Image (cartoon, rainbow, N blue to C red):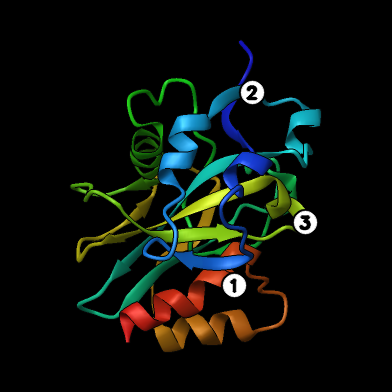
Amino acid sequence: MAKLALVVKREILFKNKYFEGFLPIEQNNYTPAILNNCFYAERTSEMEHDTQLKQIIPYIIIINSRAKKIFAYRRAPDQRYDEARLRNRWSIGIGGHIEKTDDKNPIESGMMRELKEEVKMKTYPKPKIIGFLNYDKGVEEFHFAALTLVDTDQPVEKGDDEMVDCRFYSVEEFESLISKAGNELEKWSQIAWPVIKKYLD
């Protein structure tokens, strides 16, 4: 069975406002434009490199605001992680393509499914969209993220082997980690980190 992913035409998504980097939801909420104009496309090699489409990704960041810590992990360095362009990179974001089974509000359904697939928690708090990420270079050029927060003080464990070296880090621990040679942080996480750091501070 063909894999499908939720997409929106770039020209429609950015019709009213284009940005690069992070944009708070208060400045422009892209959710209605996505929900009113989205469709599912087969995840062929051509689609994965189609500059006319934006694949919509819920990018969920887990924090413990009480302890002022962030959940971070390294993506598996081998075929266990599907997207070869992101293997072995560190990340603070959990997420993936929105699938055809994510009905009703596909963004909300997709983010809850991804959260439950990728991490184990006793209970799953409802994620909150705080803004959007766009970066038109590299693998990120073909994707558009709803930057989403989950705040919890419960333990979080990995849900599968795509994720390694995962745990909660303090701000100082995380910044020390990503400053070390060889610990490459994926681009969306680079953009999102200053935003999340303000939440934790």
Going by the numbered disc 1, the residue's amino acid type is Gln
* Mark 3 residue crowding within 10 angstroms, few (<14) / some (14–19) / many (20+): few
Mark 3–mark 2 contact, CB under 8 Å? Answer: no
The span from disc 2 to disc 1 (Cα, nearest Å) is 28 Å
Q: Earlier in the sequence, mark 3 or mark 1?
A: 3
Identity of the amino acid at label 2? Ala
Please tell me whether mark 2 or mark 1 is closer to you in this view: 2
Q: Earlier in the sequence, mark 2 or mark 1?
A: 2
Which quarter of the figure is the C terminus placed in?
A: bottom left
Q: Is residue 49 left or right of residue 122?
A: right
Mark 3 to mark 2 CA distance (whole Å): 20 Å
Q: Residue at coordinates 70% horizontally, 45% vertically from top-left?
A: 142
Looking at the image, which residue is at 73% across and 57% down? 136
- Which quadrant would the N terminus be assigned to in this image? top right
For the residue marked with disc 3, what is the amino acid? Gly
Q: Secondary structure at mark 1?
A: helix
Q: If you read the primary sequence from the N terminus, does the residue marked by circle 3 or circle 2 appear first?
A: 2
Residue 160 position, x and y percent, is 46, 42
Q: Nearer the viewer, residue 150 or 23?
A: 23
Vertical side of 9 occupied by 189: above or below:
below
Residue named by callout 1:
190
Q: Nearer the viewer, residue 66 or 140?
A: 140
Horizontal and vertical percent position of residue 137: 77, 59
Disc on res. 138:
3
Q: Which mark is residue 41?
A: 2
Give the farthest residue toward the top: 1
Q: Secondary structure at mark 2?
A: strand
Dot 3: what SS? helix
